Amino acid sequence: MDAEQFREHAHKMVDFIADYYKTIENFPVLSQVQPGYLRNMLPDSAPNHPESLDDIFNDVQAKILPGVTHWQSPNYFAYYPSNSSIAGFLGEMLSAGLNIVGFSWITSPAATELEMIVLDWLAKLLKLPDEFLSAGQGGGVIQGTASEAVLVVLLAARDKVLRRLGKNALEKIVVYASDQTHSAIQKACQIAGIHPENCRVIKTESSTNYALSPDILCEAIAHDVAIGLVPFFLCATVGTTSSTAVDPLLALGKIAKSNGMWFHVDAAYAGSACICPEYRQYIDGVEEADSFNMNAHKWFLTNFDCSALWVKDRTALVQSLSTNPEFLKNKASQANMVVDYKDWQIPLGRRFRSLKLWMVLRLYGIENLQCYIRNHIKLAEHFEGLVAQDPRFEVVTPRIFSLVCFRLLPPRNNEDNGNKLNNDLLEAINSTGKIFISHTVLSGKYILRFAVGAPLTEERHVTAAWKVLQDEASVLLGRL
Ligand code: PLP
């Protein structure tokens, strides 16, 4: 790499990105292109000779940006947020610049050690029990996604129970989660070879705001034990994907413990809120968990990807995932003096992701991060208040964090209880390009989700978004 050429190109790239953020509100939030749009705009094969950066930037403007959905737009309210920030960006940049591959301690001691330290910092900020800290038998690791996090702990738990019962017991071991648990658990079960009939999906109810009921779980476990099956893994969620339901960790954890099960807590989205003392209560009971996960790349200003996972027993992970080929052997690993994160994850190679989390924690500091979370929750509260004032709409589930679940009430005798109406409203809103929201289905009802969490969102954006929603609703209702 020619350092001077790099400097020149990288400066242009930084300018391009800075200008993008300055003008981000001018783009339709949800890309409006049709499938396959890019094929006709780009050549069939790669160029034989180098092209100029300016030509490439022109193509980015004309051909790529129209196919981008602008997750960082202040008018983005879909799914859950995926934060970018100056600190997160700088950390990514440094990581790309150093471009190390830190699978074993020796391949870049700083990458392993910084990851351990930063995850200890974050664990302390979340007031996780000391067993999750790296000083004891546990520790934290950065996975790419919450899906990888649940997969690796499921594999660890599976192998732990099979060491006790013998490999033939694979057919008998049972996983428990709720019908609100993210589909990542289903995928993890498929990969881990759990018998499809042994993945219990416990039904939740609107009366308990879609939280997993300890009583129903107990019944399911008792039934399975009675027919000779072996419960071994329970996944609870703090802040479910559909509606931010919070499962009762303490009660569920005690059930898991008394049945010898691994207890995993998925707080992919809502974990970030728990850095604020007033929201920490939502992970009370995490003391009972064997593993805990939050996505710093969702709502913690750390650019994708950065999913923090803590375990109390790192040996269980290592026993399940370690390999020790000759070509990776080295003194520090052989002497068992170091953590080799390759043994805590699926791939061998890994990026220096802790840099961006370290940058976020240092450049912003805890107080600013807490204010950041509180501000989004306040904006969601503002939106909730606006919905509540319009009798044509209802707020469907109580808002806990920064997601509001709501719907347009159907006129009397509407044949599908307003489901088509709300789907039409979603389509109409998103096709304006002014805002982007998403949906879910709860108890058979089609629900609209308004998730505040983009770093640039201010009250004026939320108020304007509500106006878009009201206007489109008026048009639709007028047509009925
Ligand atoms: N768990 C919860 C509660 C989520 O909301 C999500 C995604 O939104 C996931 C897991 C999956 O996250 P990832 O994309 O990091 O695998």
Image (spheres, helix red, strand yellow):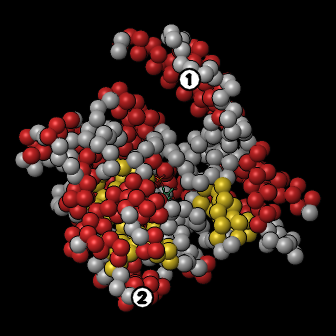
> Which quadrant of the view contains residue 191?
bottom left
Residue 443 percent location from the top left of the image: 65, 74
Asked if residue 343 lies left or right of residue 207, the reply is left
Q: Residue at x 87, y 75 (%)?
A: 412
Position in image of residue 205 (x %, y %) = 59, 79
Nearer-the-camera pick, 335 or 122: 335
Q: Residue furthest right?
A: 479
First-in-chain label (2 vs 1): 1
Q: Tell me where residue 72 appears, x and y as whole percent.
A: 58, 41
Q: On screen, 156 above or below 77? A: below
Residue 23 is left or right of residue 348, and the answer is right
At 22% from the left and 56% from the top, the residue drawn is 318
Q: Which quadrant, please, contains the N terminus? A: top left
Please give the residue where the numbered disc 2 appears in the rendered image: 223
Instruction: Tell me how far mark 2 sits from mark 1, CA to CA.
Output: 60 Å
**As shown in the figure, which amino acid type bears the numbered disc 1?**
Phe
Q: Give the residue type at disc 2.
A: His
Compare residues 81 and 378 and report the one nearer the observer: 81
Quick check: can you spot residue 192?
yes
Q: Residue at (14%, 47%) from the top-left corner?
A: 338
The mark lying in front, picked from 2 and 1, is: 2
**Quadrant in which the C terminus appears:** bottom right
SS at badge 1 = helix
The residue wearing badge 1 is 16
